[in-house]
């Protein structure tokens, strides 16, 4: 330390000032000037380098987490959309067929639609539609008093059994729901094995799951000249119908079987199908069908506002 020229302070005394030049040191043959101060780090706070490393690591963890969540969501959506539970293991046990308990005296017509009411049941008016009805004005249909619609979701071909979606299915489903109608669906089947019936049922479930279906999911097999199902035995037809309904039921939908009296009585062994509801097609003022049914298609020539072509008219029986 060296003395520098003194300065007069407040009390007139000389002060010795330290040189303001920083100390120098030699590193690798070169002189390095030091500020004379050591930078201190506050406890608990990492330096810049460490903090940056943690930020990079945190970002990587967040990115990996996001990727895992997105992958899990994709798998979940795939399962909802495409994976349908269930297999078919054959007919169950025979059971007693429930008898028809409706009374023709409880039927009446109002505003051109058939209704039913007795002390045990009441009815809800509805229609069933497919691409053959063309474009439907569903608001007008609702205004005409219709409260449910059975919409064809698809069909299988009569030659090879190839599955096709009804061209108006999505449009009809969206329009009917938007107008305030309850909706169910039906599938026109040409399955000749239970495996084909299972495939048809899974196709239907994939197309209706998450779409707000509130009415039954119906299996509709009908025989026409030259089709695939004409040579099937009664037992085979029963097994095929049961296979379709089994898959529908295992996926939390209400299965139903469609047919006219002749088809139901002569082509199916109803003792094996007592666990399902039936949709009777019988175009008459009253029906002689002896067994219980939940829905009745009573006309194929109905006229409803909002539909230019003829449409099938139905009533659904609801227990009070």
Image (tube, helix red, strand yellow):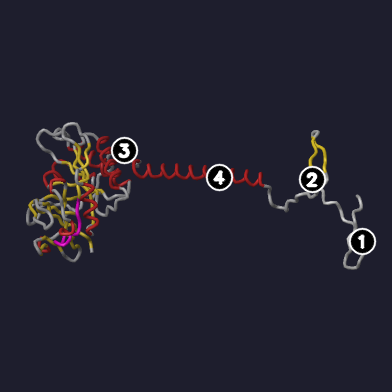
Residue 119 location in percent, x, y? 18, 66
- Say whether disc 1 or disc 4 marks the residue closer to the N-terminus: 1
Q: Out of 216 and 266, give the one closest to the viewer.
A: 216
Residue at the (92%, 64%) spot, across then down: 13
SS label for mark 4: helix
SS label for mark 2: loop
Q: Which residue is tagged 4? A: 59
- Say whether disc 4 or disc 3 marks the residue closer to the N-terminus: 4
SS label for mark 1: loop
CA gap, disc 4 and disc 3: 52 Å
Is label 2 or label 1 in front? Answer: 1
CA gap, disc 2 and disc 1: 29 Å
Q: Which residue is tagged 3? A: 89
Residue at the (12%, 52%) spot, across then down: 312
Residue 235 location in percent, x, y? 20, 37
CA gap, disc 3 and disc 1: 112 Å
Residue 190 numbered mark, or none: none
Residue 156 location in percent, x, y? 20, 37
Is label 4 or label 3 in front? Answer: 4
Q: Quadrant of the C terminus?
A: bottom left
Q: Which residue is tagged 2? A: 34
Above or below residue 112? Residue 93 is above
- Crowding at mark 4 (Cα within 10 Å: few <14, some 14-19, many 20+): few
Q: Which residue is tagged 1? A: 14
Magenta span of residues: 142-150
Residue at the (86%, 53%) spot, across then down: 18
- Crowding at mark 2 (Cα within 10 Å: few <14, some 14-19, many 20+): few
- Say whether disc 2 or disc 4 marks the residue closer to the N-terminus: 2
């Amino acid at each position: 330390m060296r003395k520098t020229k003194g300065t007069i302070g407040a009390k007139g005394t000389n002060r010795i000032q330290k040189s303001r030049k920083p100390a120098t040191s030699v590193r690798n043959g070169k002189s390095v000037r030091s500020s004379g101060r050591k930078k201190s780090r506050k406890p608990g706070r990492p330096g810049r380098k460490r903090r940056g490393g943690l930020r990079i690591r945190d970002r990587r963890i967040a990115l990996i987490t996001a990727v895992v969540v997105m992958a899990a969501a994709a798998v979940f959506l795939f399962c909802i959309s495409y994976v349908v539970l269930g297999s078919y293991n054959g007919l169950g046990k025979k059971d007693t067929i429930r008898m028809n308990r409706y009374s023709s005296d409880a039927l009446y017509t109002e505003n051109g639609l058939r209704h039913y009411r007795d002390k045990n049941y009441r009815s809800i008016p509805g229609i069933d539609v497919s691409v053959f009805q063309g474009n439907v004005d569903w608001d007008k249909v609702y205004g005409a008093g219709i409260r449910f619609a059975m919409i064809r979701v698809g069909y299988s071909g009569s030659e090879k059994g190839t599955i096709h979606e009804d061209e108006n299915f999505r449009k009809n489903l969206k329009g009917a729901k938007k107008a305030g109608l309850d909706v169910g669906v039906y599938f026109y089947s040409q399955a000749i094995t239970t495996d084909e019936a299972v495939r048809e049922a899974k196709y239907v479930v994939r197309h209706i799951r998450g779409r707000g279906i509130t009415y039954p999911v119906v299996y509709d097999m009908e025989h026409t000249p030259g089709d695939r199902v004409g040579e099937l035995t009664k037992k085979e037809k029963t097994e095929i119908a049961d296979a379709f309904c089994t898959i529908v039921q295992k996926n939390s939908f209400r299965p139903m079987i469609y047919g006219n009296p002749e088809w139901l009585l002569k082509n199916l062994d109803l003792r094996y199908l007592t666990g399902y509801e039936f949709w009777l097609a019988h175009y008459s003022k009253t029906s002689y069908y002896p067994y219980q049914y939940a829905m009745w298609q009573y006309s194929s020539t109905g006229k409803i506002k909002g539909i230019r072509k003829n449409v099938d008219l139905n009533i659904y029986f609801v227990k009070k």
